[in-house]
């Protein structure tokens, strides 16, 4: 992973010779080229360069982007952890551990089985009427709850994830004169509901607000 992708030898040479800013510009130019391949490796190299320049939040952003494109690479995981440690952030937890696809399907199947069980119990003549209604209500509520949980998780996944690149305030409205609701430190992960070229509406544990688009980097 430390090697530069094919076609970026000049960037790799600049990096190894200590010309980090030059290497960064070359790799960013490569990413902007629609014909460039190996985006994951370039993102990783940009993360290494950002670490060298003391830009830990930017490095974390690039490592997170590299992980999406090259999952399971230990070198990326280790460097991302180093950036998080430098930023004094909690250990990476995969964005609050969202449901994976197999777990979501399992919950949906279980919800369907609960609904089927409630129907069987309701139709059974051997079950007392009151008990049947209680079982029907209980299983229906469990099934609906599981389905709602899976749907809510799917909606959260639809939101884009971003890393705060510079310390910034979260404003109540898209404007620097709007009241600041809270301050975010570099490296913080946020969910993006919507974004324009200038502002992004984000979700944090304290609620929603607006940040300057230039202060965050989208992971996906």
Image (spheres, grey):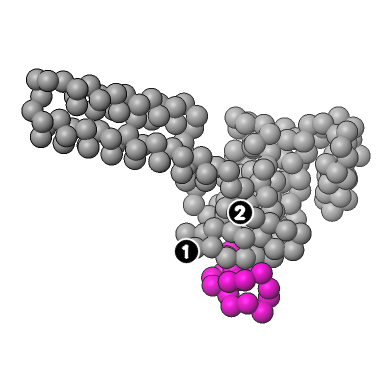
Q: CA distance from mark 2 to mark 1?
A: 14 Å
- The circle drawn on residue 206 is 1
Near-viewer residue (118 or 142) = 118
Examine the rendering and report whether any part of residue 142 can be seen.
yes
- Place of residue 77 in the rendered image (x, y in percent of width and height, measured from the top left): 59, 38
Q: To which residue does mark 2 refer?
A: 192
Q: Is residue 187 visible?
A: no
Q: Secondary structure at mark 1?
A: loop
Q: Is residue 47 above or below residue 109?
A: below
173 inside magenta stretch: yes
Quadrant housing residue 54:
bottom right
Residue at image point 60% right, 39% down: 78
Q: Secondary structure at mark 2?
A: strand
Q: Residues within 10 Å of mark 2 (few under 14, many from 20)?
A: many
Residue 47 coordinates in the image, percent (x, y): 71, 46
Q: Which residues are magenta?
A: 165-186
> Is residue 117 shown left or right of residue 40?
left
Mark 1, residues whose alpha carbon is within 10 Å: few (<14), some, or many (≥20)? few
* Residue at left offset 76%, top offset 45%: 46
Looking at the image, tell me whether mark 2 or mark 1 is earlier in sequence order: 2
Q: Is residue 193 left or right of residue 23?
A: left
Q: Position of residue 10 (x, y in %)?
A: 91, 39
Query: For the point 55% across and 42% down, which residue is it?
Result: 157
Q: Quadrant of residue 114?
A: top left
Left or right side of 108 for 186: right
The residue nearer to you, when weighing 204 against 37, is 204
Q: Give the percent coordinates (x, y) of residue 27.
A: 84, 43
Of residues 212 and 4, the one nearer the viewer is: 212
């Amino acid at each position: 992973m430390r090697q530069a992708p094919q076609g970026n030898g000049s960037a790799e040479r600049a990096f190894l010779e200590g010309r980090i800013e030059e290497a960064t510009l070359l790799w960013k130019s490569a990413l902007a080229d629609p014909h460039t391949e190996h985006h994951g490796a370039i993102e990783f190299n940009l993360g290494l360069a950002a670490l060298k320049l003391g830009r830990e939040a930017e490095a974390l952003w690039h490592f997170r982007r590299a992980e999406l494109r090259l999952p399971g690479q230990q070198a990326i995981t280790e460097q991302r952890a180093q950036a998080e440690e430098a930023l004094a952030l909690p250990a990476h937890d995969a964005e609050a551990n969202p449901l994976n696809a197999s777990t979501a399907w399992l919950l949906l199947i279980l919800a369907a089985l609960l609904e089927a069980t409630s129907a069987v119990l309701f139709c059974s003549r051997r079950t007392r009427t009151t008990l049947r209604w209680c079982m029907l209500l209980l299983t229906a509520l469990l099934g609906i709850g599981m389905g709602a949980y899976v749907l809510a998780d799917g909606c959260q996944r639809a939101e884009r994830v971003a890393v705060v690149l510079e310390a910034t305030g979260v404003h109540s409205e898209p404007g620097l004169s709007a009241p600041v609701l809270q301050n975010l430190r570099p490296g913080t992960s946020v969910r993006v509901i919507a974004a324009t070229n200038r502002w992004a509406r984000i979700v944090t544990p304290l609620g929603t607000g607006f940040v300057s688009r230039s202060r965050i980097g989208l992971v996906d």
